[in-house]
Image (cartoon, rainbow, N blue to C red):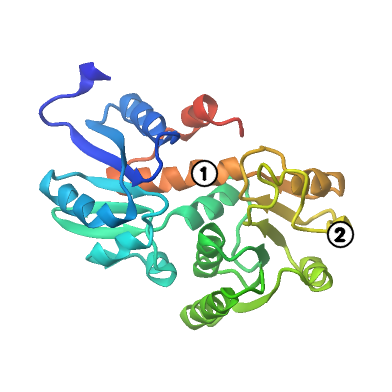
């Protein structure tokens, strides 16, 4: 890498805490090298209280942009000059582009989900989608599916002190896209979840259920909810095949793991930074098990 860094090399980075485990630097720098682009990408451990200083540094150093991970995604919003429609609705950013000092915030998690489906010949337009979860990834998926023309979205989240946020988000999406019917339900209502899945084209788990140490669990308690023709997606990518996906596969569903979403959200950010397409196939083969 040192051989390709020069006085004209543009800097890109990742902020969040912790970031030492991130695979983003390897993926982005590999892509820059493959395409002969004069960029370098590094990770910075930046806690929430230092996000403002990081934004100032991005302008000072003329950085082309930054990816943002937890716990900085919502904090970074207040420093943006402009937000994409999805970032505005969600109130969080995971990608920032520095356009000559103007900071534009995007959220590409939902794009990653939609484009991962599109890569497999599946379009969310006109579909009914049931999503389990109300956190960051779940909200990004819900918003992007609505923006991309989903017919109906049913959201299941825990009916705890934060359930009101799920209801508020459902209302915001409905207001933004009146043609998309959005409803929210209690995640503990297994019968209602089965009823909604029965009427859905796509089911998505965007909770942590299925991720280690919860890898012996599934957010869908009754596997009879699965059927041939249903598309079942899991945002969890470790393990690569969750209990949810195993049971859905046994029922004849089309199953899609979380690794593809992770790849395609990076593809979207790469395009925003460089204006070019990431060498997806090469990156997929080198860094991801999903084919």
Q: Which image quarter holds the C terminus?
A: top right
Q: Quadrant of residue 84?
A: bottom left
Task: State which mark lies toward you, 1 or 2.
Answer: 2
Q: Quadrant of residue 204?
A: bottom right
In this rendering, position of residue 6 left or right of residue 165? left
The CA span between labels 1 and 2 is: 28 Å
Q: Position of residue 103 (x, y in %)?
A: 22, 58
Q: Which mark is residue 222?
A: 2
Q: Earlier in the sequence, mark 1 or mark 2?
A: 2
Q: How many marks?
A: 2
Q: Dot 2: few (<14), some (14–19), or many (≥20) neighbours within 10 Å?
A: few
> Label 1's element?
helix
In this rendering, position of residue 63 left or right of residue 1? left
Q: Dot 1: few (<14), some (14–19), or many (≥20) neighbours within 10 Å?
A: some
Q: Which image quarter holds the N terminus?
A: top left
Q: Position of residue 251 (x, y in %)?
A: 87, 49
Q: Position of residue 117 (x, y in %)?
A: 60, 50
Q: For mark 1, what is the residue?
A: 262
Q: Which mark is residue 27?
A: none
């Amino acid at each position: 890498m040192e051989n390709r860094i020069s006085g004209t090399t543009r800097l890109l980075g990742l902020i969040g805490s912790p970031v030492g485990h991130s695979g983003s630097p390897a993926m982005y720098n590999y892509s820059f090298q493959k395409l002969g682009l004069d960029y370098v990408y590094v990770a910075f451990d930046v806690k929430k209280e230092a996000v403002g200083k990081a934004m100032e540094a991005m302008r000072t150093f003329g950085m082309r942009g930054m990816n943002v991970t937890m716990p900085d995604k919502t904090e970074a919003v207040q420093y943006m000059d402009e937000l994409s429609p999805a970032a505005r609705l969600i109130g969080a950013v995971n990608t920032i582009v520095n356009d000559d000092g103007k900071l534009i915030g995007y959220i590409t998690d939902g794009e990653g989900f939609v484009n991962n489906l599109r890569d497999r010949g599946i379009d969310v337009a006109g579909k009914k989608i049931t999503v389990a979860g109300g956190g960051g990834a779940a909200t990004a998926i819900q918003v992007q599916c609505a923006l991309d023309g989903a017919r109906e979205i049913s959201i299941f989240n825990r009916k705890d002190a934060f359930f009101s946020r799920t209801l508020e988000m459902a209302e915001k999406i409905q207001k933004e896209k009146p043609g998309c019917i959005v409803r929210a339900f209690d995640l503990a209502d297994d019968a209602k979840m089965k009823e909604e899945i029965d009427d859905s084209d796509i089911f998505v788990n965007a909770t942590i259920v299925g991720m280690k140490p919860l890898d012996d669990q599934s957010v869908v308690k009754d596997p009879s909810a699965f059927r041939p023709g249903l598309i079942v997606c899991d945002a969890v990518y470790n393990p690569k095949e969750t209990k949810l996906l195993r049971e859905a596969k046994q029922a004849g569903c089309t199953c899609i793991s979380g690794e593809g979403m992770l790849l395609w959200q990076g593809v979207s950010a790469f395009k925003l930074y460089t204006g070019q397409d990431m060498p997806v196939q090469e990156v997929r083969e080198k860094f991801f098990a999903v084919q």
